[in-house]
Amino acid sequence: MDTLDLQLKAYIEGHRQEMLALWEEIIDTESGPKQLDGVDRVGDILQRELEKAGAAVRRIPVDHAGDLIVGDWNPGSEARPVVFMGHMDTVFPAGEAAKNPFRVDAAGNAHGPGVLDMKAGLVIGLYALKALQSIGWKKYPIRFLGIPDEENLHMFSNAKTLIAQEAAGAAAAFNFEPGPVSDRLVIGRYGGGPVSITVHGVAAHSGSAPEKGRSAVLEAAHKILKLEAANDIPRGKLINCGAVEGGIGENTIPDFCKIRIGIRYRNQSIGDEIFALLRQVTEERTVEGTWAELDVSRVMACMETTDGVRKLYDHVADTGEALGLGRIPGIQVGGLSDAGITIGAGVPTLCGMGVRGEGAHTDREYAQVESLYERCLLAAAAVRTL
């Protein structure tokens, strides 16, 4: 560990309690899926802390979500910025913080709603920036993105477009999503999410005039068989027709049926195959007189393991070794994240830069407190030598 890294470590060590207190404050500020005002209150906290560090903060309104927080630090540099990013929302309903308050147990694990996914990551990004500021580092600008609605996959908003616009042209991006207890960095994520095909037919009495009906449920069944037949799980291709809604009773030919489908794809090439099949199946019909429409608005892009990602990972892994943290392995995971958006914008991105823990999206969620400080040092040192 060289002199500047020792200075970064000293700053972080000297601000442990401050970081812990900020973590608790953000946990206590509930920001569940229906709490847009809570998301904005988390945004207020980020704005306060970014402005303390000398960043210029913009709040960009997002359709049907809280504001996107954009903090630009060291904007005078002519270099391309480094993006720090994390989402401010959680999956938990209102009142969860009172039932499951922030606390640290005897084993050094922190608990509370969103403690792992991913409010700790916001603290890590903020203090990595502050640590770099403390040693007078100004090689790159840093753009901090506080994202309002990742947990619902931006299904009601234009956040994906805004994130891509704000990240475009960056030298690198670090997404502070959590990592597993086994200590891994995420170098690839599947793409996918929920899609649906809605089938329309013609209703009729199934007893007195069945010939006048055109069954949307029957047409949906043909579509389901074609879609499920295309699964290739070992190759990383999943099309799961997981729920079907349609019909009003046995005595009516149904004029409506909705197929709710979960898709996952290992890379964009496989994703393109899935989208082509979805379009084909939607447009084709076996039952004459039916028609269908496809909704893919909630799909999240995959985080491809590009050459840029591999180079960024190698640099961060080398940094971890130099810091005495060991060489942290890189993995691909099935879960979705906003890293796919920045990869799609052409920015080398590393994900899973947040704390280690388990139980995300449950009341058993916990995070290892020591990893808050370790990952903060790793991020700051890696950016310093980027």
Image (spheres, rainbow, N blue to C red):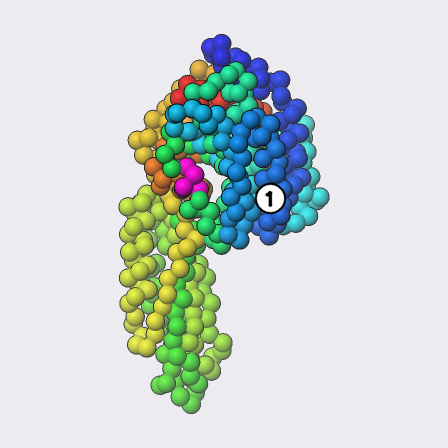
Question: SS of the residue at dot 1?
Answer: helix
User: On screen, 161 above or below 102?
Assistant: below
Give the residue at the far right of this rendering. 98
Give the residue at the far bottom of this rendering. 208
Percent from the top left, x then y, of residue 319?
Answer: 43, 19
Residue 108 or 297: which is nearer the viewer?
Answer: 297
Dot 1 crowding, Cα within 10 Å, few <14, some 14–19, many 20+ = many
Which quarter of the picture shows residue 255? bottom left
Quarter of the image where the C terminus is located? top left
Q: Which residue is mark 1?
A: 40
**Res 240 visible:** no
Q: Magenta span covers which residues?
A: 163-167
Amino acid on which disc 1 is placed:
Asp
Please tell me whether residue 363 belongs to the stretch shown in magenta. no
* Residue displayed at 54% across by 35% down: 57
User: On screen, 259 above or below 19?
Assistant: below
Which quarter of the picture shows residue 282? bottom left
* Residue displayed at 66% across by 29% down: 21
Q: Is residue 310 left or right of residue 101?
A: left
**Res 349 visible:** yes
User: On screen, 291 above or below 281?
Assistant: below
* Residue displayed at 44% across by 15% down: 322
What secondary structure predominates along the stretch shown in magenta?
helix
Percent from the top left, x then y, of residue 171?
Answer: 37, 29
Percent from the top left, x then y, of residue 133?
Answer: 53, 20
Give the residue at the far top of this rendering. 3
Which quarter of the picture shows residue 216? bottom left
* Residue displayed at 39% across by 72% down: 200
Please tell me whether residue 166 belongs to the stretch shown in magenta. yes
